Amino acid sequence: MESLMSILIGVFFAIGTYLILTKSLLRIILGTSIISHGVHLLIITMGGVKAGGPPLLGLGSTSFTDALPQALILTAIVINFATTAIFLVLSYRSYKVLGTDDTAQMRGNEDE
Amino acid sequence: MSLLHIMILIPFIFAIFVPLLYKLFNSRIHTGWFVLIIPVVIFIYLLRFIPGISSGEAAYQSLNWIPSFGINFDAYVDGLGLVFGLLITGIGALVILYSIYYLSKEKEALHNFYVYLLMFMGAMLGLVFSDNILVLYVFWELTSISSFLLIAYWYQREKSRYGAQKSMLITIFGGLAMLSGFIMLSMMTDTYSIREMFTQVDTITGHSLFIPAMILVLIGAFTKSAQFPFSIWLPDAMEAPTPISAYLHSATMVKAGIYLVARFTPVFGGTSEWFWLVSGIGLITLLYGSVNAVRQTDLKGLLAYSTISQLGLIMSLLGIGSAALYFGYGDEADLYAAAITAAIFHMINHSTFKGALFMVVGIVDHETGTRDIRRLGGLMTIMPITFTVAVIGAFSMAGLPPFNGFLSKEMFFASVVDVSNLTEFNMDTFGILFPIIAWVASVFTFIYSMILVFKTFRGKYKPERLEKKAHEAPIGMLISPIILASLVVIFFFFPNMIGDYLLKPSVAAVLPAIAENSIMDMYITPWHGWNTELFMTIGVIALGTLMYISLRKWAGIYRMYPQSITLNAIYNSALDKAQSWSASLTDKYMTGYIRDYIAYLFGFFILFVGGTLIVTNSISFDASNNAPVNFYEIALMVAMIVAAFTVLLAKSRLTAIISLGVLGYLVSMFFVIFRAPDLALTQLVVETVTTALFLLCFYHLPRFKEQVHKEKKGVPFKPLNLIISIGVGVVVTLFALSANGTRLFEPIAGFYEDSYKLAGAKNIVNAILVDFRGIDTMLEIFVLCIAALSVYTLVKLGLSRREK
Amino acid sequence: MKKPNDIILRGVTKVAVVIIFTFAINLFFAGHHNPGGGFIGGLAFAAALTLMFLSYDVDSVRANFPVDFKVLTAVGVLIAVLTGMGGVFFDLPFLTQAFDYFHLPIFGKTELATAVLFDIGVALAVIGTAMVIIMTISEDR
């Protein structure tokens, strides 16, 4: 399972990177989202998968999956939501102001 | 925090309040009056140390700064530091008093001026009173920075900016060299304390890093004290307001190099390298400065070169004096210790007469509107008091009695004559050069001193060439130069007053070993019989007068020296080349395309992470502990890969966004498989809201480029991008596999499994979030809050400003 | 933007929003012992509000839900910080949480924890942030 997950994460990273390297702002944002999915899966895979029951004491199981990566990812998901929102609004604003979403055309002047 | 530390820090603290005082009172009271309090108080405070110091005690206070690195803010007051401290605050007070009349409170940005000035004063005090070399370095650079700010005070002028940049580049370069020298010293001795280094001189002298450390420290000192060939920054620093030139660039900051050399004489001194470098460079600078001063037409330029020359004189005396350490103690050592006495005495004298001369030049500039010697003349009757001060200062500089310059000049001659008889350090071959260079340089010193006085104040008054109608300066402006000029005379008649209380303890600080074992009988007297020194002085006056009278006839030889190989020309072309070269280099990789920069980042990531994996040989693959795989899990993975590729290849935005949503939901299913119910729920809801967000922005963002250009089919293919992205994917996979194969530590999760007992919660994840690691969560909601505010600001406020 | 006039969507929304609100509050309080908590509860609540925005227009929702979400965010952060300060008054490290069991009339033996207060702050901040972002974008036409 872990090995397969590693490959899956690698694919996510590769696709995300390719999207980030394109010119369209929307594609770049899509790329970051995919990479962040990859990161979340990476963290939880590193914590060990299926090692025990869910980290809920109420269920009465004796061994639990590592809860720390889960807490980390929970934080990461919410932060990722905020950063995606900022990204979106930034690209939206820059499109409105500059009239393009092509990063190649957003080059500043020579003197900037 | 002792009183000593407060003394060093109080200029900085007071500087914070200067802008406030300026704002509140400047319309009525000149801000300088408030600032004046600081140096006066510190000066009086320092005076109280004199009795203790002169009887051989030293004050020491420690303050922990970064104790784990052994870096402590140790304040240490001994004779040498005290002399400098008194100069810094004494001259500082006079300069501030002078500046109150020199800088108009209506026209000038006084708050900037005094903040920089106080910053400098504090930095300088910290420099001379700190025992820790790293603290010393910090203050050293602070003086460079404040000097930069003060030179660029009239930053509207191009020349000010040029001069400021030049001084900054050269002194900071020297400072960095000095820092590396310091680090070498601390490597040799395993301490940062200067006084502890004194106890390990033998370790240092025998160490292989001795020579490099010495040269690097000397570069620091030479750049700061404008020694040849680093001297070129000082003439350009004259663009600063005259009070600053008088204070920083003649009396105090440029003497920081002298201080450094004196301070480290016990560590490095007594070796032939130190002797030759310090005295040799000093003598060259002495000659270079005085010869060049003669040809200046700007009064401040003349004084700048004269300062360079005088600093060279002091430096060479310190070099000669270091020979004393070679002899241990005895009569010979005392002979050379006298050179150190002369050095410090001349340094004090130089501060008095040069300070007075700078102020005089400032007055002339202020009252006539020019400092050009060719346009000035005949001011003697118009400005009698200024003229008197100028005569006292210039004659003292030329080494004439009855002024203090005569005493220290005679001591200088005595030292160079003595040292020429030395047989060690190859002096039997080159020793004779010392008195010759000293004498020739003194002749030129005499000439430019006369130029300064007589070309300005005698001759014909040419009002048509002046911008203003000349008149005597207001009395307030004259107070400081008069005080300095009287000191010039007083020191001549009562030299042993300083000798006993200041010179002796500072020589003891420079040559501690010798001071302990000899009486150091130094009695300074104006008259010591018809000896070599006196004949040398008489020769200087005779030849100098002759050459001054015939100046017009031989001044032409200055023009024969080609301009293209002057130090300045070399500096300028080097700077230009460096700028154009770095600009072309930067242009090569800073393309302005964000995509390229991101490609660099990913490229670096591949090289660094992949390289580390390969170099440390940590790529491993161990599938034995893997969890079993179910059929539906593989199906999920395939579905995810398909969704991801759809995002990549989608031709319309809507498809891409929806595929991304699908991907997010699939990820949340994986969280279910991985026994993470909280994550699954969160991911589910977040994905919903994010997709809504994407769709909202969807209306605004343009279509994908391929849709606009229908002729192009599919995503434009970029091989390099593909290589980079596959590289990133492979590196991450390798990294994940290797990390899985090797487990170095036991997981710490066991602690959190007690969450019911520790936090009363049965949901471990939630207990971690709100209790165990609550501060993370709190900061996280700060981040959220900031994100919300930025979005709001970007949309609402950005728009309203654009619409105006 | 075209004015969506979808009667089915609106009809469903009316019912669904109530259900989601209830579910969100349930999720929030479940958080202490079961899956849920401030983040999830807050986000679910925000999702319900988003649904309202999508099916109705911004103004009518605002009329029925007169809350300034910027203030809500700030209040959430403030509550979280103040809960953290609680520990300081008892000479404990910042953000120390306490819990105890009480016998309340209707609920019986109940656990009351300051962590729940902290979680309320988190939830409010999350709702506020999500709504500020979405409303800002949707209002900017």
Image: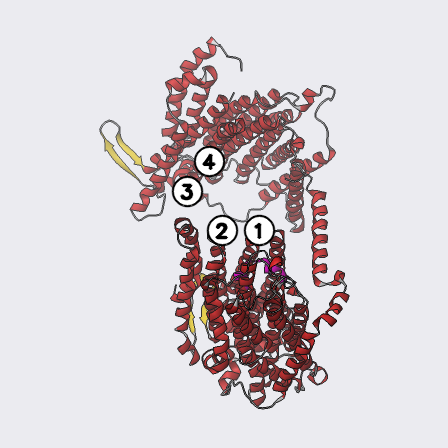
Q: Mark 2 points at which residue?
A: B109
Whether callout 2 and callout 1 share a subunit is answered: yes
- Left or right relative to A60: residue B613: right
Tell which circle, 2 or 3, labels the residue nearer the N-terminal end: 2
Tell which circle, 3 or 1, labels the residue nearer the N-terminal end: 1
Disc 2 from disc 3: Cα separation: 46 Å
Q: Residue B775 carries which label?
A: 3
Magenta region, residue range: B235-245
* CA neighbours of label 1 inside 10 A, class few (<14), some (14 to 19), many (20+): some
* CA neighbours of label 2 inside 10 A, class few (<14), some (14 to 19), many (20+): some
Q: In this view, does B353 lie above or below B155?
A: below
Q: What residue type is labelled 2?
A: Ala
Disc 3 from disc 4: Cα separation: 16 Å
Whether callout 3 and callout 4 share a subunit is answered: yes
The answer to if B568 sits in the magenta stretch is no
Tell which circle, 1 or 4, labels the residue nearer the N-terminal end: 1
Q: What SS does tag 1 mark? A: loop
Tell which circle, 2 or 4, labels the residue nearer the N-terminal end: 2
